[in-house]
Image (cartoon, rainbow, N blue to C red):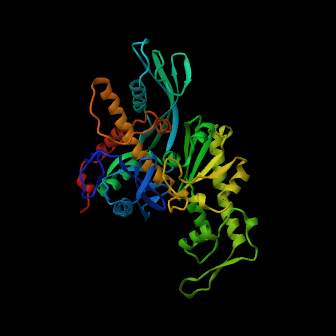
C-alpha cells in the first residue's frame, strides 16, 4: 500500500539541522508541470531556491489522464528544481484542479460541557475536523473544509471565537470535494517519482496566497485563474473564502480555435499567434497587418490578417468571461465584489484581456502577478501570472510546517517547559494573513486512507 508520510527535505551532503522549512510546490497543469523550491528568509518573506518546468502531455482539462506521461513530466520538473536548489526533493505540496471539483455549504456544531470556560483553539480544531465526517456523493472525496464566520451560543458573526465564553460552538462550512479517482491518479504519479505528498490543495486557493492582497480579500474579490484546460474561480469576502468553481474551458480552446479557423498551421504556431500577435480587441488591430506562417512541406504560406485573428480570439474570450459572470451571479457573489476581478494564470497574459473583461463585466479588473509573501523582483522570470499556482503551493508548504510546529509548541507549553531548537519566528502579522486552523493532519489522513483502500500492491506503481 502507498504510505503517505511527512519527511524533511534535506540539503545534499549536509547534516540535518533544525532550520526554516524548505518546501516544494508542484503544479500539475494541462499545458505544463511546474515545481518551485522555497524557504523563508530572515526578513519573513520567501525566497525561491530552485525551479523546474516541463511540458505536460498526460493531463486534459486539469485531470490526470495518462499516468505514465504525467509522472515523466513531474520527474523532469522535480529533477530540474532539485538540481538548481542543490537539494534532494522527497516531499511536495501538490495542487488539484479540474471540472470534477465541487463545493457546497453545510452547518456544523459541537457542544461543550463547561459553559464557564473560554473557547480554545482545540475546540475550533475539533469542530473543523468533525466536518470531515460529512457524507458526500459516491466516488467523491473531501479535499478541504473552509469555515465561514463562527457562532458561540447567541453571539454570531465571529471571525475568531477563541476566548469567548459559551456552550455551543458552530459555523457554516464550505466543503470542497473532488473526484476520488482523479485524486488517486495524482497520488500515483507522485509515488512513481518516489515522492511523498506533503498535502493536496485546490489550485485557486494556492494562487490566492501569492496574488491577492489582504485588503482585497476583505473588500470582496474574485480570483480568476485562466489555465490551459480550465478556468478556476475563488471568491473572497470579509477575508473568507466564500465560493469556488471550475469552468471546463481555458486558454487552450482559444488556441484550438485559431488552428481550426486558419488552415495549414500546427498548434504550436497557433499558440505563438495568440501570445505574440493576438488581442481581445479587434478594433486595436492594424487592418493592413498580415502575419505569414510558412507552409508545411513546401505548401503555400498561410496568410493571417491580425484583425481576423483578433476576432477569433475575442469570440472565445467573450464566452469564457460570460461563463465567469454567470457563475458569480448564480452563486450570489457578483454584487459583493468591491475589488472586482483579479485575473491570473497563463491566460491572463492575453493582450487587452483586462480592458475587455472590464468592458464585459462592468467590474474593476487587474492582472494578478505573484507578489505577496514572496521575495520576487518585477524583472524576475517568475514574476508572471502563469507561475502563481506553483509559487502559492510552495508558500503553503512552508506555512503548513510552521503551523504544525506552532501547534506542537502550544501543546508543550501547556504541560512542560521544553528547550526549543532555534528557528525562524513567524510574526503575528504573518500568522493573521493565513488560515488560522487549517486541518493539515486531517487532510493527510483522509488522502492516505483513500489511496491505501484502493491500492493493494505497491509494486504496481513502482518503476521497473
Image quadrant of residue 65?
Answer: bottom left
Residue pushed farthest bottom? 298
Q: Position of residue 428 (x, y in %)?
A: 47, 35
Image quadrant holding the C terminus, namely bottom left
Q: Position of residue 239 (x, y in %)?
A: 56, 36
Q: Position of residue 137 (x, y in %)?
A: 45, 38
Image quadrant of residue 311?
Answer: bottom right
Left or right of 5, for residue 174: right
Image quadrant of residue 399?
Answer: top left
The answer to whether 444 is drawn above or below residue 54 in the figure is above
Q: Residue at x 30, y 42 (%)?
A: 453
Q: Is residue 172 visible?
A: yes
Q: Position of residue 69 (x, y in %)?
A: 38, 63
400 vs 205, nearest the viewer: 400
Q: Is residue 96 visible?
A: no
Q: Residue at x 67, y 40 (%)?
A: 338
428 vs 114, nearest the viewer: 428
Amino acid at each position: 500500500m502507498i504510505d503517505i508520510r511527512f519527511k524533511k527535505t534535506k540539503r545534499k551532503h549536509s547534516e540535518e539541522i533544525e532550520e526554516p522549512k524548505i518546501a516544494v510546490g508542484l503544479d500539475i497543469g494541462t499545458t505544463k508541470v511546474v515545481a518551485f523550491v522555497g524557504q523563508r528568509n530572515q526578513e519573513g518573506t520567501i525566497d525561491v531556491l530552485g525551479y523546474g518546468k516541463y511540458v505536460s502531455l498526460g493531463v486534459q482539462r486539469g485531470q490526470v489522464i495518462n499516468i505514465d506521461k504525467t509522472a515523466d513530466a513531474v520527474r523532469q520538473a522535480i529533477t530540474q528544481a532539485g538540481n538548481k536548489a542543490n537539494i534532494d526533493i522527497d516531499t511536495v505540496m501538490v495542487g488539484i484542479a479540474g471540472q470534477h471539483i465541487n463545493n457546497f455549504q453545510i452547518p456544523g456544531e459541537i457542544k461543550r460541557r463547561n459553559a464557564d470556560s473560554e473557547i480554545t483553539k482545540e475546540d475550533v480544531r475539533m469542530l473543523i475536523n468533525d466536518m470531515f465526517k460529512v457524507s458526500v456523493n459516491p466516488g467523491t472525496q473531501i479535499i478541504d473544509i473552509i469555515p465561514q464566520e463562527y457562532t458561540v451560543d447567541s453571539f454570531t458573526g465571529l471571525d475568531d471565537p477563541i476566548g469567548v465564553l459559551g456552550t455551543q460552538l458552530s459555523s457554516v462550512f464550505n466543503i470542497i470535494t473532488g473526484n476520488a479517482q482523479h485524486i488517486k491518479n495524482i497520488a500515483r504519479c507522485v509515488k512513481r517519482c518516489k515522492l511523498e505528498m506533503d498535502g493536496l490543495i485546490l489550485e485557486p486557493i494556492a494562487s490566492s496566497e501569492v496574488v491577492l492582497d489582504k485588503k482585497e480579500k476583505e473588500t470582496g474579490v474574485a480570483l480568476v485563474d485562466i489555465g490551459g484546460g480550465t478556468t478556476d474561480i475563488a471568491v473572497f469576502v470579509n477575508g473568507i473564502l466564500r465560493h469556488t468553481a471550475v469552468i471546463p474551458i481555458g486558454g487552450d480552446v482559444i488556441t484550438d480555435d485559431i488552428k481550426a479557423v486558419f488552415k495549414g498551421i500546427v498548434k504550436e504556431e497557433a499558440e505563438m499567434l495568440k501570445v505574440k500577435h493576438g488581442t481581445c480587441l479587434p478594433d486595436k488591430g492594424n487592418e493592413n497587418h498580415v502575419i505569414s506562417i510558412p507552409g508545411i512541406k513546401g505548401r503555400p504560406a498561410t496568410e493571417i490578417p491580425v484583425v481576423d485573428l483578433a476576432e477569433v480570439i475575442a469570440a472565445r474570450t467573450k464566452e469564457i468571461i460570460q461563463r465567469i459572470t454567470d457563475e458569480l451571479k448564480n452563486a450570489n457573489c457578483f454584487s459583493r465584489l468591491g475589488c472586482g476581478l483579479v485575473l491570473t494564470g497563463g491566460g491572463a497574459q492575453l493582450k487587452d484581456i483586462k480592458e475587455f473583461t472590464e468592458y464585459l463585466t462592468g467590474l474593476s479588473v487587474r492582472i494578478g502577478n505573484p507578489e505577496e509573501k514572496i521575495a520576487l523582483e518585477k524583472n524576475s522570470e517568475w514574476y508572471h501570472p502563469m507561475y502563481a499556482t506553483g509559487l502559492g503551493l510552495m508558500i503553503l508548504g512552508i506555512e503548513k510546517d510552521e503551523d504544525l510546529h506552532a501547534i506542537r509548541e502550544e501543546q508543550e507549553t501547556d504541560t512542560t517547559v521544553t528547550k526549543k531548537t532555534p528557528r525562524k519566528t513567524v510574526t503575528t502579522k504573518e500568522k493573521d494573513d493565513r488560515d488560522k486552523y487549517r486541518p493539515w493532519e486531517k487532510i493527510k489522513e483522509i488522502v492516505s486512507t483513500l489511496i491505501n483502500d484502493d491500492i493493494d500492491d505497491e509494486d504496481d506503481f513502482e518503476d521497473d
